[in-house]
Structure formats: C-alpha cells, structure tokens
Image (spheres, rainbow, N blue to C red):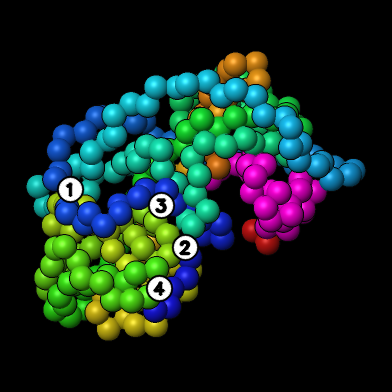
Amino acid sequence: MRWILLLPIVLACVDHGSDRTPLPATPGVPEPSAIAIANERAIATVATPRAVEADSAFPAPVVPEPPQDSLRFDAAGHPLLPWIVRSACQGEDCTTQFEGLACSATVLHAEPVEASPVVATVAEGEMVQVVRRDLHVNRAGIIVVKRDHVLDHDYSDEDDLVPRTDTLHFARGDTVYALHYLALGRWVWAYHARIYDSNEFWGAATHDMGANSSDSSVAIARSQPQREDWWLVATRAGVVGWWSNTAHWELHGTFQMQHWGDDCAQIRKRVLESDERH
C-alpha cells in the first residue's frame, strides 16, 4: 500500500487500537472564538549553533485535563467545527509531553487563540516543559466516493489485510469528512454523523493532499483538513501558557533534536529558506 504524509513533519498520538466501533455524536462544549491570523515571524540572526542541553530538565507542573470534546454534527450529518482533540498530535513520532528548547524568543498565550493575552515571554535558549498538546480541527477535508464500495478490512503495520470489526457500505456520491491524520497511512474521518478511523481507501487529486495517490477508483480527496497544533507550555518560572506549533516555529523538542542530529542553526536556516519560497 502506498501513501504519503500530509505535512512535512507529522505527529499522531490518538491510539484507537483495535476498537473500531464508531463513536456516537453527543453534545459538546460551545465552539471557541475564531483564531486570529498568526503574527509575522521575526527571525533573529544566530552566530553559532545552540547545543541541546541534556541535563536541563526541570519538574513539569501537573495541569488538570478537561474532558474530551465530542464531535457534534448538524441535521445533515456535517461535522460542526472546530473540534478540539485533547492530548493529541499527528504522525509517527508523536509525543504529548516533553522538554523543549526555544531557538528564538517567543510568547505564550492565556488561551489557545493567537488573539488572547500574552502571559509569558520565552527567551532564546530557554528550556521549557510541554505538559500537553491539543489538536484543533478547524476544517474537514472533503472525500467524494466515486463508486459503491464496501469497507470491511484494514491493513496491519506489515501491510497485511485484517478484518474490521464493523463493515461500512458507501454509495456513489457519498461524502466522507477527513478530520486528522494518525500514523502509517491511517486517518480519523466522519461519515453519516459518526466518527471512524481506517487506512486510506481514497486517492488524491494532487500529491499535497496527503492521501494515497496509487488508486482513486473508489474515492477521491478533493481537499485536505485544516488543523492547528497547540502546546501547553510551562516555563522554569512556573508560568503556563499556550503556543501554536502551526503558526510559529521557535520551540522544539530536545529529544527530537538529539535524535535527528538537529540544532537551532539548522532549524533557523530551514525557516528562512521556507520564508523565501513563500
């Protein structure tokens, strides 16, 4: 089975395990306010690479986690977004609690909204603790079913066929709402006002949609979901605030940097090159 990732770096942490029973739609909390457009990033010059400090960890505070939000649907079965998936991220290297390093100065907000008040400034070179991260699904991706299809199997990590515990019947013209990526070609999606997860059974109109491009005979992805990755960050001074990994670049996990042999100078170079392309 062939598939490609939706993002250059993807993180996934929602573990659905072997239970694929669809989740009922139940009332959720009121939708949060609209997220403001991210501020333009200011990139300072670094003379020398900043090494990751291996012995810089400090105790992370215990922050109560609110109940998981339920995804709600309207009368026509369309998902009502945004939807916050708590303690969640995307991709094969997902982790939700870790030590971080500021490769450039940044700020933390009172709420996971760019327009909310700033509660702390994180200086360049400062170590922080990420105590949680939430995935905000702001817009669903649209997948159109092209022919009648029965989904009765999935794929294991070794690409072996495994039967599903539920069997789904799709009709030509049906719409599937892609919500967020898990890992290894697996997605969470909504259909007929219920949530499911599966390997990709659709193809992609273009490669940047992150779906399997080898077979589009069953269904085709017309658009990709729009998501934001928000980190709940604790400073050494004990201040806790929110930071957007989608709108900003300054904070990075020290373990990932050590694992990939990365440093702040390399990260800054990639950011500058990306800004020049856009």
Task: Give the amino acid at mark 1.
Answer: Leu
Quadrant in which the C terminus is drawn = bottom right
Q: Secondary structure at mark 4?
A: loop
Circle 4 residue: 158
Task: Give the amino acid at mark 4.
Answer: Glu
Can residue 221 be seen by looking at this rendering? no
Q: How far from the left and from the top, in percent, is residue 242?
A: 52, 29
Q: State the residue at coordinates (71%, 49%).
A: 258
* Distance in Å between CA atoms under marks 4 and 2: 21 Å
Q: State the residue at coordinates (33%, 26%).
A: 66
Majority secondary structure in the magenta region = helix
Can residue 63 be seen by looking at this rendering? yes
Circle 1 residue: 23
Tag 2–tag 1 contact (CB < 8 Å):
no
Eye-nearest disc, 3 or 1: 1
Residue 226: which disc? 3
The boundaries of the magenta stretch are: 246-274
Quadrant in which the N terminus is drawn = bottom left
Q: Secondary structure at mark 2?
A: loop
Q: Looking at the image, is mark 3 or mark 1 earlier in the sequence?
A: 1
